Image (cartoon, rainbow, N blue to C red):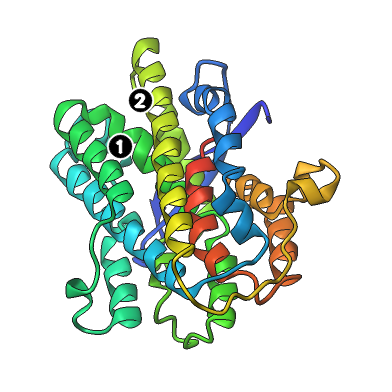
Amino acid sequence: MSAEKMETTDIMSNGAGPVYEEKEETLGPEDLSELLAAGTKEVHEKAENTQFVKDFLRGRIRKELFKLGAVALYYTYTAMEEEIEKNKDHPHFAPLYFPVELHRHEALARDLEYFYGPDWQSQVSCSPATQHYVDRIHQVGQEDPVLLVAHAYTRYMGDLSGGQVLKKVAQRALKLPSTGEGLEFYQFDAIHSAKAFKQLYRSRMNELELDMETKQKLVDEAVKAFQFNMEVFEELEEIGKTIQEDVLDAGMPVHGAMGGDISKCPYYAAKMAASGGTAYVCQLAMAVLRHPTGQVLFATWVAALAGLAAWYLM
């Protein structure tokens, strides 16, 4: 990892909303972002090698699973944003409170209305694996709010990493309207530069006054976030076995088909894109565009996975 990153400060520009000014900052081994990277490496590799993830990287798609993935995200973000609102003045979370820029549950509700219709709420429910995740988010919000930092960072930073590329791919593969219906989850209208905003967010996170014991608790919580998501992947995989639906196979290669070169994996590209590196954003875009029909499920869950891995290389 690079020994340096960009710190940002927010300023106003002609009343159009915040923009972000970059400046150099040296990272140290005790910065939270560095500790998260080292502490989650093993569980991250397990997450990307679950059967569900490997299947969708191959482009084996069931539309119903794409919709169920959006349902799981809706319940997850609703729980997280409820707890964020309750703890927005907590000294260890207040610097990371960006509801206008980041909150996703309302956008996901509009996506679900598009896919399921006006009565979507009567058609969806929180699955057991998602409920397990939701319960943990509520628990930490009520008992130890500083741990919300781990959940918020893993989710939102990934949403901002490669999300626009994935939005365009899903729009094409699903033949969704060019006006964005069904994919509002990916649209951050209040953020003018995703890269600069992520830099600001990481900088504020690293500036939180936390002792090493608390930082380790955050690393442990981030590991749990990976595990909760793996439970959701495994659940979707089981549901997929019961769905009778045509499967589009775009032949998306996984690590084993790449001669062991992880850098050629499109999920790895998404993960690296989460770090803000332009080269890896391009790598992700190239991987996506080579497989235009294989990215429907990829578009939803790689965005979620990139969220889990966003802080891994930050």
Distance from the alpha carbon under mark 2 to that under mark 1: 8 Å
Q: Position of residue 2 (x, y in %)?
A: 68, 30
Q: Which residue is mark 1?
A: 95
Q: Which is more toward the observer, 92 or 186? A: 186
Q: Secondary structure at mark 1?
A: helix
Q: Which mark is residue 293?
A: none
Q: Residue at x 16, y 27 (%)?
A: 143
Mark 1, residues whose alpha carbon is within 10 Å: few (<14), some, or many (≥20)? some
The amino acid beneath tag 1 is: Pro
Q: Residue at x 27, y 70 (%)?
A: 109
Q: Earlier in the sequence, mark 2 or mark 1?
A: 1
Q: Residue at x 57, y 18 (%)?
A: 28
Q: Position of residue 71 (x, y in %)?
A: 32, 64
Q: Position of residue 79 (x, y in %)?
A: 22, 49
Above or below, comparing residue 15 to residue 155 in the picture? below
The answer to whether marks 2 and 1 mark residues whose Cβ atoms lie closer than 8 Å is yes
Instruction: Locate residue 34: give its quadrant.
Output: top right
Q: Which is more toward the observer, 217 or 236? A: 236
Answer with left or right where residue 205 lies relative to residue 277. Answer: left
Q: Which residue is mark 2?
A: 208
